[in-house]
Amino acid sequence: MAYQIENTQQGEKYNTIFSKVPAAERRKRSARSRLRKRVLLGTYIVLLMLPIYWLLNMSLQTNSEILGSMTLWPQNLTFDNYIGIFTDSSWYMGYVNSILYVVMNMIITMLVALPAAYAFSRYKFIGDKHLFFWLLTNLMAPPAVFLLPYFQLYYSVGLFDTHIAVALAHCLFNIPLAIWILEGFMSSVPKEIDETAYIDGYSFPKFFVKIFIPMISSGIGVVLFFLFMFSWVELLLARTLTSTDAQPIGMIMTRTSTASGIDWGTLAAAGMLTILPGILVVYFVRNHIAKGFALGRT
Amino acid sequence: MTWMVWTLPTAIFFSSIAAMLAGMTIWELRSPTVERKGFLPISTTRGDRLFVSLLSAAFIHLGIIGFTTFPLLVASALSVLWLLILMRWG
Amino acid sequence: MNNKVQNNRAWLLVLPMLVLVAFSAIIPLMTVVNYSVQDVLGPHARFFTGTEWFSTMLNDPALHAAFGRQVAFSLIILAIQVPLGIGIALLMPKKGWQASAVLILITLPLLIPWNVVGSIWQIFTRNDIGLMGWSLSEIGLDYNLTRNASDAWFTIILMDVWHWTPLVAMLCYSGLRSIPEAYYQAARIDRASKWAVFRYIQLPKLTNVLVIAVLLRFMHSFMIYAEPFVLTGGGPGSSTTFLSQSLTTMAIGQQDLGPSAAFSIIYFLVILLVSWVFYTTIMHMQKDKNSQGGA
């Protein structure tokens, strides 16, 4: 705890400065600093939201209004762009496809990553460190490298243009990520808990499901968030492995750009709709994220 | 398997990597490695040293292929030498 | 946590994961290696070329330039995003509905598909219909990212900062939350300055999440593809063509499998080296810290 010692020394230095400042003055200062914090954070969030607001703004306008004049908010509010998407199955099936493979990927990843992360956090075994590093290297492999072999691999096993193909392909980077995060959370659970449970006569699977998983539920929340995120936003592999039946929404959006120009309104509306599932997911895991990753990794 | 367009040299390459991994596993089972500090700035196990030498072998080959006109065998000879040095004193 | 038990049966727990990842990682990797030593014109028309593609790629000036741009880009965005992310995490409210609301708003950009991020910024920066492009032109700046290379760079960096700083902020925020309130109370009793609190309480707790953040950011920025592709298409000229895009153009656009495979392998080896050095350094730093009995 070296910093605490240094802390006291620092503290003494500041003591002498602070003691000359009257209490009322100090309170005023802290109120002012809180206000400054709010303003800075508020500015950042406004800047962060501006591009998204602009997308929303355009999605509620007709193309002629978008191209006609510069308007900061829709003058003639219209929902036609959204209605167009929801009434055309070739459009909304894109969302269904994307959600399907993302959910499949989350399930597969969790099923294999939980036991593996447990093994890494509790046991030493031959090659464990190298295996762990090899897993991490898969996070680093640029998907662009693998596009063609992937296409041929999934084509040759007959999975091309299915949701499961994309789900399996996304395992390449999602499983290592899940193991990496879960391992940290699991290591923060004391080993004594495992031992007591085994003494009490729990079998490994029963202990794992009944006792261990509930203990790391925050970790699972965080991991699910990341699995969703990286599978939902990835497009390169998803579009390479599909053609018509399982095409992700990101690919269908490219249809808005045709020889006669870009259908800005529909593009913006489709873009807005890709943000919605994300909002839902963050909403569900917001408390887990706040609880933190840092838990085990001290 | 035809789409994987195998060639003899690459097949030999991957088999020898697999053989190395298998060999390392058996060696580890027979006599577990002890982490130690050699001339590398970090303390390493046997597996770490093998990894370091393989990675540097890759870069030695790239360097020789890309920036010199020496035959490839020079690179391989250098790599093997480097591997032996690393495994013994690394 | 150095009380792990030696048990090789743990391999059984790892096996299912290994099979899945190996299927997606090793078979394609082997194929790429096979491509790299041949000129593949079709399944039955291929010629062994040995190391020719490697020497071509290593001496290709266009790729050197793309590599240089890539390194510059990754360093710039790390230098901006890490301090900015820490700063934002420090500003975020600690509890209550405001904390949830801020968290949800901030993570929003992370959950947008990458090509949509590109589209958003493409729209946002257009001079005719985009808020930013229009405003900059209105105040008399000659802003045009399809003609001016420095504008294109500025926009891509701004986009990446917009897109990814939230990840750093979110990780740091969760790191800050894990600091027990008692530490802050002790600091208050000591009347430690804000800087002292940051330097000796918050920063040490943040190092672990910062490692995750920097590794993730480095790896993702090094293979950035969709956003610049949609936003600038690599232009003007090739001023914003990064490695992934050169690679994809070569492999898919020109069907040059051999050279692009050789290039992929070189690319992968570079990332492997950097990540290994980084990972090992961090792991040893942690080990030293633990062996001194601190933190």
Image (tube, coloured by chain):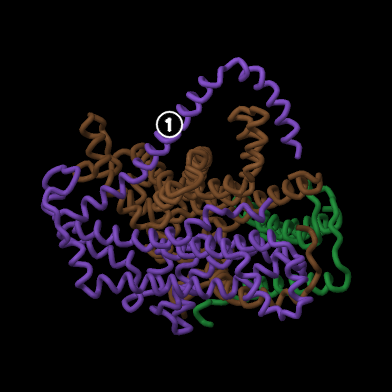
Q: Tell me the residue that label 1 is attached to.
A: A35
Question: In the image, what residue occupies the spot 77% across and 44% down?
Answer: C294
Q: Quadrant of the N terminus of chain A?
A: top right
Residue B68 horizontal/vertical position (percent): 63, 50
Q: A60 or A171, which is in the foreground?
A: A60
Q: Colour of chain B?
A: green
| Chain coloured brown in this rendering | C
Query: The residue under label 1 is which amino acid type?
Result: Leu
SS state under label 1: helix
Residue C43 x/y as whole percent: 46, 79
The local crowd at label 1, few if under 14, some if 14 to 19, many if 20 or more residues have their Cα within 10 Å, is few
Chain of the residue where label 1 is placed in the rendered structure:
A
Label the purple chain with its letter.
A
Q: Residue at x 47, y 82 (%)?
A: A156
> Is residue C171 visible from the viewing direction of this image?
yes
Q: Residue furthest right?
A: B31
Q: Position of residue A32 (x, y in %)?
A: 45, 27
